[in-house]
Image (tube, rainbow, N blue to C red):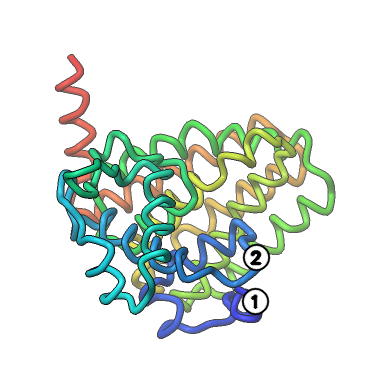
Amino acid sequence: MGDEKKNIWTKKTSDVLNYPMSELIYYDLKDAVGVAPSLATHVCRELGRRIVSGVVREGDLIDDETRLGKRFGVSKSVVREAVKLLVGKGLLEVRRGSGTRVRRRASWSLLDDDVLAWHLSADPRPDFLRQLMDIRRIIEPNAAAWAATYGADDAHAEIMKAQEKMEEEARSVEEFVVADALFHRAVLRAANNEILLSMEGVIFSALLSSIRLTNTDPRENEGSIPFHRQVAEAIVVRDATLAESKMRALLTDTTVRLDEATGGLTTAKHKESETAAK
């Protein structure tokens, strides 16, 4: 992302809250820096977003290389490479003689960073939001406890810095979103667990997906600040049990606000899943 990456945290609403705002924040949280994306990567992302958002549906055939090349203004070889990337992520399958088709969602590599990021440019799916929140409830309370136990002092300082930034930016939608995301990243990284870090993309996707719905009004930001402050304070004094408890309380508050924002759809989908499982 180059210089654009360095400036993402200072962008305003018009830049950060519009397409592909959450994607950019996601990649920044993952420290996805390096060379500029290739043409094939750009085409891969555009096609991937269309698939994840449902514009191109499961089972649909996509256009052939010639049509896609004309649409994106690239060569057939670039389209071919983009398709290979999507095949590797489980979104497409190529069948000789019958074309390239979108695979069933169950076949997608949902933990792939790009696939997680592309969900952030699509309309939120209540069932997927609920599943992401379930994962957060499994991981983040433990991460808070580990951060309290194993986190270095400088890692704890990053948590407090992000928490203080949340308080400073409480009246701003976009800056508060960034501070909130940095807070949770700091907690995950303070846990000092390499295996956990390999899963942080799921947490970032879950966090940014819920924030898109629960933090649309800056007046609502004040309500979540005490929960974050209590988590930070428990971690800094190295009280693992309290840190875990406070993170659970934070996530419960998030779940309630998310349910309110979706008109109860996330809870409804959860109950449907539980009923179907019986």
Residue 19 horizontal/vertical position (percent): 36, 74
Quadrant hosting residue 245: top right
Q: Residues within 10 Å of mark 1 (few under 14, many from 20)?
A: few
On screen, residue 22 versus residue 233, left or right, reads left
Q: Quadrant of the C terminus?
A: top left
Residue drawn at the location 51% of the way across and 60% of the way down: 26
Q: Which residue is mark 2?
A: 33
Residue drawn at the location 52% of the way across and 48% of the way down: 201
On screen, residue 90 versus residue 3, left or right, reads left
Q: Is residue 196 above or below residue 71?
A: above
Q: Residues within 10 Å of mark 2 (few under 14, many from 20)?
A: few
Q: Is residue 75 above or below residue 120?
A: below
Residue 101 horizontal/vertical position (percent): 22, 47
Residue 172 horizontal/vertical position (percent): 47, 78
Q: Which mark identifies residue 2?
A: 1
Kind of residue at badge 2 = Val
Tell me if label 2 and label 1 are in contact, CB under 8 Å: yes
**Which element is circle 2 on?**
loop
Residue drawn at the location 49% of the way across and 37% of the way down: 248
Quadrant hosting residue 20: bottom left
Q: Which mark identifies residue 172?
A: none
Q: Closer to the N terminus: mark 2 or mark 1?
A: 1
